[in-house]
Image: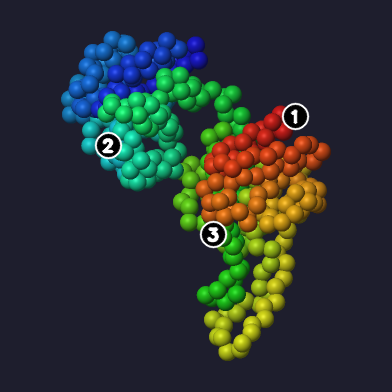
Amino acid sequence: MTLENKKIGLIVTGGIAAYKSLGLVRSMVKQGAEVRVVMTNAATKFVTPLSFETLSKNNVLTDLFSEKESEHVAHIEFADWADLLVVAPATANMIAKMANGIADDFASTTLLATEAPKVVVPAMNEHMLMNPAMQRNLRLLEQDSVQVIEPETGFLAEGYSGKGRFPELETIMAVVNANFSDKDKPLKGKNILVTAGGTQERIDPVRFIGNDSSGKMGFAIAIEAQKLGANVTLVSGVSKLPDPVGITTIRVKTAIELSEAITRRFAEQNILIMAAAVSDYRVQNVADQKIKKDEDTLTLTLEKNPDILKQLGKIKQNQYLVGFAAETQNGLINAQEKLEKKNLNLLVLNDVSNAAIGFNSNENEVTLLRPQMENIFIKQTSKKQIAGELLNVVISDLKK
């Protein structure tokens, strides 16, 4: 049994899909898990606690202020006991509490107190699901490393079809099992350094040379690598994205600072993924004061920044190096040249002239190049999806 001796806490909140969580308990128990259930007061209006007690063979906890044993604080004991907490169904109210750290009942207090991984299964009306506040709360949960299972589309309780249905039990159980399976953590024990964002090179105290990189691609790679079990270090240039939870994040601005941060940590890395958009040049003489527009023209003398990947390609031992090539023309020719010159294991080519997939976009379309191997084209999709497919290629190469 894949869940033998695993301790899973199920938190059931007050939605019509609460009855479906009975099947979830049955599936987890059948696989050998010890399951304990917490229900909100609203959940008890849909399904009786006795139903969950019968299937789980454990008492159901509902009231923060009716703790029966004096030896311990029940919600803290529950939070410490669980190897995994699953919130299913998760209502809009509970998701909002989790996203904003509100703890006003047994369920939300337990969720705030636990250090165990959390899986959230939203189920609600489509209009509630797509509300900007709800989407913002779901993004906050994902930033906090909470695993959110996408609701399905189908016939809703309101009598019409839409997105918001409770997912199939098989879908939820696959995520539950993945939390306990090393085969789903193929990068476990690997040290990965990912760079992201753009760099800025000062002209004077108020001006700089930079680019439009948002850091979204690099951040997505770092987050997906963490999910796959890697020990991730993220070195980020200028980006408005928040530091991912559980990932060591180092902020830099210039290409020199980025180079120093990487070089200092390179020896201990197994994989380096250079997704940052690094300035090729810097100003030779940075002005101490703001440059006045006294003349009709202004001449700046630029000098080359270090080619970080090329330098590391020369000294790498067993490290796997991934570079990015942001091109506007002759993409494949330029990318192939970079792959060879920099001694890379993989190069990711993307066309930044396409506004739909360029800088700041949530989507991308890339070609993966490797020495003496056929190119892999990944059509336009989310940067999260591309991050996953990129890492799958890296994992496959490492196995070989």
Q: How is the image coloured?
A: rainbow
Q: Residue at x 58, y 36 (%)?
A: 388
Residue carrying label 2: 93
The count of marks equals 3
What type is the residue that disc 3 sits on? Val
Q: Secondary structure at mark 2?
A: helix
Which badge, 3 or 1, comes first in the chain's sequence? 3
Q: Viewed as shown, does residue 209 lie left or right of 343?
A: left
Q: Say which of marks 3 and 2 sits in front.
A: 2
Q: Say which of marks 2 and 1 sits in front.
A: 2
Which badge, 3 or 2, comes first in the chain's sequence? 2
Image quarter where the C terminus lies is: top right
**Percent position (x, y) of residue 151?**
40, 30
Residue carrying label 1: 400
Residue carrying label 3: 238
Judged from this view, the residue extending furthest toward the front is 160
